[in-house]
């Protein structure tokens, strides 16, 4: 099983700031089969990025993903009020598919 | 637009079973599969399994083998997840999501169904 470790656990930021979230895999995520999701309280997760760096249609370009192998990042440029949420990474290289434990981006 | 609408919250006693439905619309049901995950409070989602709506092919997570059943009804474009022999550790929000294959992204998701197991 591929274990995904996200860091940090919580980020306290102000609107307008930029940030980078980390997702580290216990073994190589081949073909960059890594996705990022955003989840707001009481809601289902929403797909932001697949293939490590491809934004889903309709996702603002302030969200960007990068990385390869075992280290991946999600960058959010100029945080908007609606961006404060929990972010999860997910690998889809092999079963069982696994998710990270999440990074919470909260308003400072 | 593509939508997945799940059945409502459930409260069950230990040892009971729960069956959650996931009604889809806005796309050809048999062109995709349905993934099921659950999420305990404050934790990341946990993959439970995947079922192909095209041919019924199934993959279950090993930890649920023997007490999990996933099915689909192509006449109503609805997927079902039944979990048996519930314990308090099964208390979680259960989500369905559309998936293109047995591994892949989850897009979109149902709104979630809270299952509470308590005596």
Image (cartoon, coloured by chain):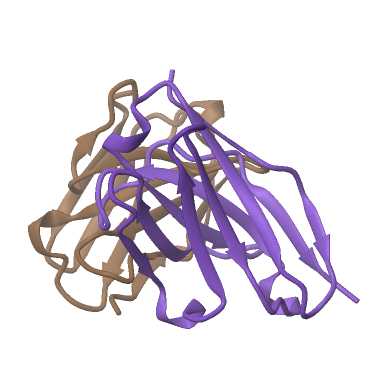
Chain colours: A brown, B purple
- Residue at position x 77%, y 49% from top? B9
Q: Residue at x 52, y 66 (%)?
A: B69
- Is residue A74 positioned above or below B64 on the image? above
Q: Position of residue A4 (x, y in %)?
A: 34, 70
Q: Is residue A40 left or right of residue B50?
A: right
Total labels drawn: 0
Q: In front: B107, or A46?
A: B107
Task: Point out the residue furthest to the left here.
Answer: A31
Q: Nearer the viewer, residue B82 or B62?
A: B82
Can see residue A76? no
Query: Quick one: which residue is furthest to the right in this view?
Result: B119
Q: Give B70 or B40, whichever is nearer the viewer.
A: B70
In the rendered image, the vertical position of residue A89 relative to residue A71, given as above or below: above
Quadrant of the frame with the N terminus of chain B: top left
Q: Position of residue B82 (x, y in %)?
A: 60, 62
Residue at (76% x, 77% y) in the render? B88
Q: Nearer the viewer, residue B17 or A95?
A: B17
Residue A77 position by quadrant: top left
**What percent of the width, then of the height, locates residue A44?**
56, 42
| B58 on left or right of B115 | left
Residue B43 horizontal/vertical position (percent): 57, 65
Quarter of the image where one finds residue A16: top left
* In the image, farthest residue toward the top: B1
In the image, taking residue A84 as reference, residue A66 lies left or right, namely left
Quadrant of the frame with the C terminus of chain B: bottom right
Q: Is residue A43 visible?
A: yes
């Amino acid at each position: 099983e591929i274990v995904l470790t996200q860091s940090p656990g919580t980020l306290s930021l102000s609107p307008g700031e930029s940030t980078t979230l980390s997702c580290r895999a216990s073994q190589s995520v081949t073909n960059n089969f890594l996705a990022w999701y955003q989840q707001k309280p009481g809601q289902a997760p929403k797909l932001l990025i697949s293939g490590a760096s491809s934004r889903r249609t309709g996702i603002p370009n302030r969200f960007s993903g990068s990385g390869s192998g075992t280290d991946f990042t999600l960058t959010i440029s100029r945080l908007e009020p609606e961006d404060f949420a929990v972010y999860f990474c997910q690998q889809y290289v092999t079963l069982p598919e696994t998710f990270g434990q999440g990074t919470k981006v909260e308003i400072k | 637009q593509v939508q997945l609408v799940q059945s409502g919250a459930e409260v069950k006693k230990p040892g009971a079973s729960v069956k959650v439905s996931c009604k889809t619309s806005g796309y050809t049901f048999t062109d995709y599969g349905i993934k099921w995950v659950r999420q305990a409070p404050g934790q990341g989602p946990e993959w439970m399994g995947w079922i192909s709506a095209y041919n019924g092919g199934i993959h279950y997570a090993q930890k649920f083998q023997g007490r999990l059943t996933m099915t689909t009804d192509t006449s109503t474009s609805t997927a079902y997840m039944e979990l048996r022999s519930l314990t308090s550790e099964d208390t979680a929000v259960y989500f369905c999501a559309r998936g293109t294959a047995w591994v892949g992204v989850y897009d979109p998701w149902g709104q979630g169904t809270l299952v509470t197991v308590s005596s």
